[in-house]
Amino acid sequence: MCTYLYDNVDIEFASADDNDKVQISQINHFIDEGVDLLIVSPNQVNTISPAIDRAYDMGIPVILFDRKSDSKKYTAFMGADNQMMGSIIGKYIIGQKSQGTILEIKGLKGSSPAQERHEGFVKGIGDGSRLITCDGDWTQNSGFRLMDSVLQQRQDIVCVFGQNDRMAVGAYKAAKKQGLEKNIMFVGIDALPTKDGGIEQVKKGVLSTSYIYPTRGDLLIRLAMNILEGKPYEKENLLKSALVTHENAEVMLMQAEEMSEQNERLSTLHEKVDWYLSQYRHQRIYLLLMGIIALLIIGLMWFRIYALRRRHRIEREAFALVTATPSSSTMRERVTAPSSPEGDKTEEENTDASADVTRVSKEQQELIAEDGDIDSNFLDRLRQLVQEKMTDSDFGVESLASDMSLSRVQLYRKVKALTGRTPVDIIRLSRLNRAKALLAQGNRNVSEVAYDVGFSSPSYFTKCFKDEFGVVPGEMK
């Protein structure tokens, strides 16, 4: 429950099973672990004190719970008032059995509850001459063994006070073994609401009465948190309780059963809340992962699109660089053209166009060089060979590959990778661009231009020209 009230608390449990050495080892382990607070239920009054003192001296707050030690080095105590319980039990017995011998079976020798309950019990009965005592160990077997031994020696026992219900029930069974259980009253302490616990034993008539021993773990955790958080707290915290008799045992059981059902429902609700919180945490993680994955996918898609666009742009620029008509060709055409006023004008225009082409080519080369993805030397060599040899109608891919010192397959792969076009496309488009520039001068017919740029068939040249530029060569004049 405390995990729902205090979400910043981790609790570690250890049980020594009434073994002093084990408990000392456990306390030292928690000290060495560096716990923020230590809750101890000392097995005996004096044996555990040095370990408790060590924790307290190292600045660790110490709460003694249920039992005390002889050390004064503790931060707070919480538990039942054992002396008061012993006194109330003593007074109850005197009210029921004014005559006869009373047997007290004490708890573990040296433990504070055993000592305090005995002290209170002696005060409660008043007449100590009626009392005989023996030391048990809180177990039913010890109660059975001690009662069986006493009954073999004397038959005047009218009441047995077991310092807990288990020893009292053990004494009852020993008396029943000898057929004396109806002549003796049995009283205990704890009154647990469990099956065969103290309250049920009172209801059955096995025990005449039992005293509810409070635990109140919720109050213990609250006390611990007040200490840790620096809030006010009481050093001595005694828990209240009450007697269970045959008259109220059934009501007590009903209340206990109702509380048990409520606890089960709360546990179920807690499990569901834990499950929902777990699912919520998982869903948050899944959503976060999905968001990250979505962002990665979007980023990858954007990068892919950017890379493709960039690649296509570079290919277009590289292709334009390779297939552009160089100024030298235009200059040669200008030199061979007939001289006339109009011709001079045309030559000047072509010179300007040629300069533009050359300037664009340089810009394209700079762009490609900046991108770093294109082998500029390879493209320059490719362009130079195509421009120089395009006028030869026998010039084709095989010749180009040989001049580039590559196989046909290698040439194809590299040109395709760099420009997005095949070597055949490069040669054909370079010829068509040259032809377009020559036709624009208007001093040659279609057939002459076709042969000059390396086409062996004017009709095929016309077809290719129209496919590329959308007009027949004759319309360029």
Image (cartoon, rainbow, N blue to C red):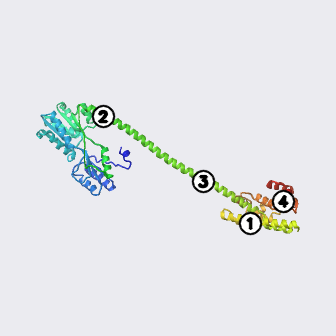
What residue would you read off at disc 1? 359
Determine the CA span between mark 1 and mark 2.
Answer: 101 Å
- Frontmost of labels 3 and 1 is 1
Point out which mark residue 300 bears. 3
For the residue labelled by badge 4, is the local secondary structure a helix, a strand or a loop?
A: loop
Q: Which amino acid type is shown beneath numbered disc 1?
A: Arg
Determine the CA span between mark 1 and mark 4.
Answer: 28 Å
Determine the CA span between mark 3 and mark 2.
Answer: 66 Å
Within 10 angstroms of label 2, few (less than 14), some, or many (20 or more) residues? few
First-in-chain label (3 vs 1)? 3
Q: Which amino acid type is shown beneath numbered disc 3?
A: Leu
The answer to whether the residues at label 4 and label 3 have Cβ atoms under 8 Å apart is no
State the residue at coordinates (38%, 39%).
Answer: 267
Q: Is residue 220 above or below residue 416?
A: above
Q: Tell me if residue 404 can be seen.
A: no
First-in-chain label (3 vs 2)? 2
Q: Position of residue 145 (x, y in %)?
A: 20, 39
First-in-chain label (4 vs 2)? 2
Q: Position of residue 204 (x, y in %)?
A: 25, 31
Q: Tell me if residue 294 can be seen.
A: yes
Q: Quadrant of residue 102?
A: top left
Q: Quadrant of residue 271?
A: top left
What residue would you read off at disc 4? 455
For the residue labelled by badge 2, is the local secondary structure a helix, a strand or a loop?
A: helix
Say left or right for 257 vs 369: left
What residue would you read off at disc 2? 255
